[in-house]
């Protein structure tokens, strides 16, 4: 069946026996018909059809659902596939390699799934709800998370007096520019005012918009107000981020902000702001070799407030687990940049809770904000229906790092807005216009790569101390869109290793060498090393080659290389893996061809915004515009604004 070349050939829609028989004789036969089919999709669909019947439409819906989950969606909306072909592929000449399968129209698919009784209360492994098909696990996560957030947003804590908030804000924002003139709203001031009386808040904004600066003032505000209300009470605050690197950056930014606030904010208040951030996994308490954490709904965390940074990287399942482990009274503050790539695993929590553009505040919230900040220019929400999720979100818009004139900031803004020709012009003209920040690298890899290696990687071999080497390593990184191909991570790392080996410094055949930068590619909870952690191979005082990693408590953690979990060399890394990190100089390489599903404006934006002061890009014009025009879309059924009985 299906392997005679015709689309949907051999499907007997009327046959009684069809529901008992697998549609394809084997996985290999299915692969002949359907392009990009993975074993997991096939066996998932087989397994479920054993119970639900081998209806061809259902079987292929299940394949599509499994593929959706692999691609990070939390569900499969029927409208995204109804009437369309699935698994079809042809080559450049139009020669068909996989005939695929054509899905029925929406109303027929809807009828089929409705009749199968897959509603949430039916306790099937899959759920059909509001024309979306889910794996029950993800449906449950969405329902749960939405309810948790709504409960927090509903506020089960004692609010502060408005006058006290006003006084506190006057201390924190003494020369507020809130009313300086039209369009000059100080969103940092508004963000603190907005979050200080809520149980759930999101502060979102691009790089350098002052998220950490603002949230440090917010923590100070909460501590001041709490100390005034109950002097004996010490707020327990947990600062967390999804990766070790992001946690380290959060700690550093908070320390810097606290230092800058001395004199403005009482020392007693600043002393109560924690400066050490943890990874989300560490907060929840990893149990080696188990998916469950030490903290969960029956063993709650002790926290009055949990601040989660870089939320775009946190997936749906992990976020739900954090909320499950929180006591009822604890507040949650999420920080992140919703324009960045979503999490690797399924979900797009930040995007789902913080829709853009901001629809405005509800009249009630607006009145409160006007009262405590004296700002009269805030946007009011147009529609008054539903739950006011937008009241819990504030966007910071002004970058303090990129002044709007520098190339990196302008390029990032043009890319995320999808303005492909403008962004390409920024790149091509950068040289002529003397832009110090941007550079378009010439086409041939070997015409520019050696110079960057000499500038940034050769000096690693001349460092006497390991901390000097780490600080050098943190200054520059090559970011690739992909792993494979000439411009992929694997090839670039090999080319650099060979170049260094030719100079007698590195070892290109895979043996360890002094000064080799490595990145961990699997979590090892016992060693406290996580996927994405970056370290170096370094000769210790005794002359032994050791693996060394920066460590928040120890300074450096030294390990025998034989103990390392899986790792790879890291002169170049994927853009995906650099989320949560920044470098003074970034060189970003795009593939040579446009036939690449990974390219998207979110990917380019994430890569661009990893650069603090210099960005060099190697790309062809057509690949660049293909990337800027592409979008990452994540399907989910999650919305905070629907009424409770509408579920998800
Ligand atoms: N209102 C302000 N006045 C002066 N400096 C500010 C202000 N807001 C932010 N900054 C400075 O701008 C820089 C970036 O701020 P911050 O690190 O808080 O931004 P962020 O949005 O958290 O950045 P990231 O992209 O690193 O997450 C810091 O040096 C900070 O001290």
Image (cartoon, rainbow, N blue to C red):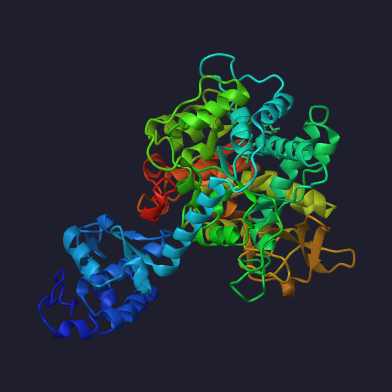
Asked whether residue 83 appears in the rendered view, the answer is no
Would you say 381 lies left or right of 247 here?
left
Q: Nearer the viewer, residue 317 or 342?
A: 317
Would you say 86 lies left or right of 550 here?
left
* Displayed-image quarter of ligand 1: top right
Against 92, residue 428 (above or below) is above
Q: Nearer the viewer, residue 633 or 151?
A: 151
Q: Residue at the spot x=58%, y=58% of the render? A: 323
Q: How many marks?
A: 0
Would you say 629 lies left or right of 16 here?
right
Q: Farthest left residue?
A: 14
Q: Residue at the spot x=67%, y=30% of the render? A: 165
Q: Position of residue 366 (x, y in %)?
A: 51, 28
Asked whether residue 243 appears in the rendered view, the answer is yes
Quarter in which the N terminus is drawn: bottom left
Q: Position of residue 356 (x, y in %)?
A: 44, 38
Q: Nearer the viewer, residue 30 or 58?
A: 58
Q: Quadrant of residue 292?
A: bottom right
Would you say 97 lies left or right of 538 here?
left
Quarter in which the C terminus is drawn: bottom left
Q: Residue at the spot x=24%, y=68% of the render? A: 113
Q: Position of residue 645 (x, y in %)?
A: 38, 54
Q: Position of residue 407 (x, y in %)?
A: 54, 29
Against 157, residue 412 (above or below) is above
Q: Quadrant of residue 75?
A: bottom left
Q: Farthest right residue?
A: 542
Against 195, residue 454 (above or below) is below
């Amino acid at each position: 069946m299906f392997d005679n070349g015709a689309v949907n050939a051999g499907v007997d829609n009327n046959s009684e026996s069809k529901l008992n028989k697998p549609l394809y004789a084997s996985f290999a036969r299915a692969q002949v018909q359907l392009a990009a089919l993975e074993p997991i999709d096939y066996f998932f669909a087989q397994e479920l059809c054993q119970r639900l019947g081998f209806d061809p439409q259902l079987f292929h819906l299940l394949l599509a659902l499994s593929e959706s989950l692999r691609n990070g969606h939390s569900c499969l909306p029927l409208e995204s596939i109804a009437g369309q072909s699935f698994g079809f592929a042809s080559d450049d000449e139009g020669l068909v390699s996989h005939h695929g399968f054509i899905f029925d129209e929406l109303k027929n698919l809807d009828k089929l799934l409705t009749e199968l009784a897959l509603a949430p209360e039916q306790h099937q492994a899959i759920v059909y709800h509001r024309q979306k098909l889910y794996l029950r696990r993800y449906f449950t996560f969405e329902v749960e998370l939405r309810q948790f957030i709504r409960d927090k947003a509903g506020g089960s804590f004692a609010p502060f007096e408005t006058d006290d908030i006003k006084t506190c804000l006057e201390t924190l924002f003494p020369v507020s520019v809130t009313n300086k003139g039209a369009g000059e709203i100080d969103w940092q001031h508004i963000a603190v005012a907005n979050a200080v009386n809520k149980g759930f808040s999101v502060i979102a904004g691009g790089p350098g918009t002052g998220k950490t600066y603002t949230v440090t003032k917010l923590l100070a505000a909460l501590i001041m107000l709490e100390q005034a209300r109950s002097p004996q009470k010490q707020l327990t605050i947990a600062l967390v981020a999804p990766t070790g690197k992001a946690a380290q950056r959060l700690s550093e930014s908070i320390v810097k902000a606290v230092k800058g606030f001395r004199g403005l904010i009482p020392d007693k208040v600043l002393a109560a702001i924690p400066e050490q951030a943890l990874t989300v996994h560490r907060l929840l308490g990893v149990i080696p070799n188990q998916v469950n954490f030490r903290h969960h709904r029956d063993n709650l965390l002790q926290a009055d407030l949990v601040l989660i940074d870089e939320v775009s990287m946190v997936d749906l399942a992990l976020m739900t687990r954090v909320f499950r482990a929180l006591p009822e009274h604890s507040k949650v503050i999420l920080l992140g940049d919703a324009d960045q790539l979503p999490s690797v695993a399924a979900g797009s929590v930040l995007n789902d809770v913080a829709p853009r553009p901001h629809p405005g505040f509800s009249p009630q919230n607006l009145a409160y904000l006007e009262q405590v900040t004296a700002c009269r220019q805030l946007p009011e929400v147009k529609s008054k229906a539903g739950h006011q999720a937008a009241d819990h979100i504030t966007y910071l818009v002004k970058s303090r790092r990129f002044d709007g004139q520098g190339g990196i900031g302008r390029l990032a803004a043009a890319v995320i807005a999808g303005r492909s020709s403008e962004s390409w012009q920024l790149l091509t003209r950068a040289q002529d216009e003397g832009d110090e920040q941007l550079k378009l690298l010439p086409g041939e890899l070997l015409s520019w790569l050696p110079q960057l290696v000499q500038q940034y990687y050769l000096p690693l071999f001349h460092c006497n101390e390991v901390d000097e080497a780490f600080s050098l390593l943190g200054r520059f990184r090559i970011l690739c869109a992909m792993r494979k191909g000439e411009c992929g991570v694997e090839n670039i790392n090999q080319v650099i290793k060979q170049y260094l080996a030719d100079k007698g410094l590195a070892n290109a055949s895979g043996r360890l060498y002094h000064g080799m930068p490595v990145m961990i590619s699997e979590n090892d909870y016992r060693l406290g090393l996580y996927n994405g952690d970056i370290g170096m191979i370094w000769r210790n005082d005794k002359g032994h080659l050791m693996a060394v990693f920066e460590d928040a408590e120890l300074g450096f953690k030294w390990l025998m290389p034989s103990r390392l979990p899986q790792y790879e060399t890291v002169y170049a890394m994927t853009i995906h893996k650099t989320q949560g990190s920044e470098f003074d100089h970034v060189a970003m390489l795009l593939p040579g061809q446009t036939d690449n599903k990974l390219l998207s404006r979110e990917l380019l934006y994430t890569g661009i915004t990893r650069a603090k002061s210099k960005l060099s890009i190697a790309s062809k014009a057509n690949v660049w515009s293909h990337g800027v025009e592409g979008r990452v879309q994540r399907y989910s059924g999650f919305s905070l604004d629907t009424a409770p009985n509408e579920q998800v």
